[in-house]
Image: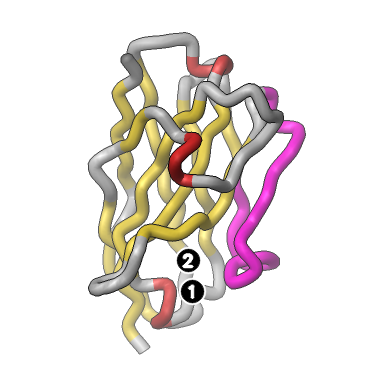
Amino acid sequence: QVQLVESGGGLVQAGGSLRLSCAASGRTFSNYVMGWFRQAPGKERVFVSAISRSGGVTDYADSVKGRFTISRDNAKNTVYLQMNSLKAEDTAVFYCAAANARRLITTTPRDYDYWGQGTQVTVSS
């Protein structure tokens, strides 16, 4: 089992920044591909960003490219999502997830084995 706890969400004005953190415990963190997903009210959960086990490969949804940066610190068992130039449409609950996937990286929710409880991000326009 892997336990994931997100933090760093909150209310921010459009154009502002937030840094989300996701602390993992339970299993060897570096064995897992890590991802961030988000779910807006009334919508499905969608991919935001993912990072490979070593941190050397990353992927982003088109909607956040150039604004969000994912990173991980395997020594601290933590993955981060730096979010800049936030827009009202970024408002959602953000979830981190861990995948024990064969692939180097994955953007598919069903590939992820463990999920955090989510942190609310609200961007006011």
Q: Amino acid at mark 2?
A: Ser
Marks 2 & 1, CB-CB < 8 Å contact: yes
x 33%, y 36%: residue? 115
Residue 98 located left or right of residue 49: left
Camera-side residue of 123 and 36 = 36
Residue at numbered disc 1:
86
User: Hey, which quadrant is residue 41 in on the image?
Assistant: bottom left
- Label whose residue precedes the other's in the sequence (2 or 1): 2
- Give me the C-alpha separation between circle 2 and circle 1: 6 Å
**Quarter placement of the C terminus:** bottom left
Q: Amino acid at mark 1?
A: Leu
**Quarter placement of the N terminus:** top left
Residue 112: % across, % down: 45, 34
Q: Which residues are magenta?
A: 54-70
Residue 66: % across, % down: 69, 66
Q: Which type of secondary structure does the marked residue at label 2 adopt?
A: loop
